[in-house]
Image (cartoon, rainbow, N blue to C red):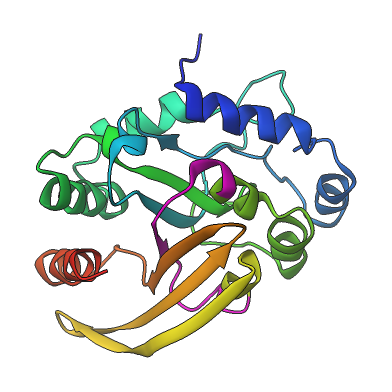
Amino acid sequence: MPTHNNLEQSIIDMYTDIHLGSCYECSICNEKNEKLSKPVSCWFVGDRFHLQTKRILFVGKNARGFQEYKDENKFIEAFDDGRKLWRNRKNWAYWSYTAEITSRIFGDDSPEYISFTNFVKCNNSDGNDTTSKNMKENCIIKKKVLANEITVIKPTHVIFYTHTDYDNYIPKVFDAFRKEVDEKKKIGKRNMPWLEAEAELDDLKINVLRIGHPQCKKKVDFINSVCDWISRN
C-alpha cells in the first residue's frame, strides 16, 4: 500500500478535485496522442520539506516508463516510486546530481528535504521526450496541473530541468514572471542555457531557475552552479 505524508495527501486530494486522468483535457490528450500513459503524480514532497527556510521544488519534463503501470486509479501515485528511484540513483544524473545538490544545501542527501515533480504528467516514450504541443497546452495551460501543485507545495525556489523546450510555457504557470538573467553558462565543455527569474503565484513569491537536464553535464560544474544560485537567492 503506498504511503505518503500530509502534503502528498493534499496533492492527491487536489488531483482528485481537478479530475486528473478523467477530465475533458485528459480525454482530448488520449484521443490525439497514441499509447499515452496515465497521469503520473509528482515524485515526492519530502517529510521535512515544509520545515526548511529554502523550500526547493525540482521540475523535470515528464515521467517516463509508466506506460504499463497497472493501477485502477485514474492517475498513478508515484511517491514510493520516486523515493525508490532516488535510492537507486547511481547511474542516473537526473537523480544523483539532485541528491548531491540536496546534500550540499541541507547537509544530507535525503529526498525528505526537497520536492520533485514533472512539468507534464503523461508520456508515451521510455526514451526521448516526445511530449506534443497539445499535451503541453492541455496539462500546463488549460489544466494548470503544475500551478496547482505549486500552490499546494508552496516552494520558495523552483528549478526546471527542461532546457529551452518549455520556455514558452514556464511563464504561463505563474501570475507574474520577471526574467532577470537569460544566458549560456559553461558547464564542462557544454554551453548550458541558464535562465533566472522572479515569479509570483497567488500569494507566493518564488525564485525560478531554468537550466538543462543534468544528463551528460559535467557533475562538479553543474552542481556548483545550481548550489551557488540557491545560496544567493
- Residue 91 spot, x, y in % from top left: 22, 46
Q: Residue at x 51, y 8 (%)?
A: 1
Indicate yes or no whether the magenta region holds residue 167: yes
Number of numbered discs on residues:
0
Q: In the shown orientation, is residue 71 left or right of residue 62?
A: right
Pick out the residue farthest to the front: 203
Q: Residue at x 58, y 29 (%)?
A: 10
Residue 87 seen in render: yes
Q: Residue at x 34, y 27 (%)?
A: 47
Q: In the shown orientation, is residue 2 left or right of residue 87?
A: right
Which of the pair 47/224 is nearer the observer?
A: 47
Pick out the residue farthest to the bottom: 183
Question: From the viewer's perspective, is residue 6 above or below residue 58?
Answer: above
- Residue 215 spot, x, y in % from top left: 30, 63
Q: Which quarter of the rendering shows the C terminus?
A: bottom left
Q: Residue at x 87, y 45 (%)?
A: 27
Q: In the shown orientation, is residue 80 left or right of residue 106?
A: right
Residue 124 seen in render: no
What is the span of residues highlighted in magenta in the rendered image?
A: 151-168
Pick out the residue farthest to the top: 1
Which of the pair 21/124 is nearer the observer?
A: 21
- Residue 109 spot, x, y in % from top left: 16, 39
Question: From the viewer's perspective, is residue 209 above or below residue 99?
Answer: below
Give the quarter of the image for residue 106. top left
Give the quarter of the image for residue 191. bottom left
- Residue 101 spot, x, y in % from top left: 19, 54
Give the quarter of the image for residue 110. top left
Question: From the viewer's perspective, is residue 132 above or below residue 124?
Answer: below
Indicate yes or no whether the magenta region holds residue 124: no
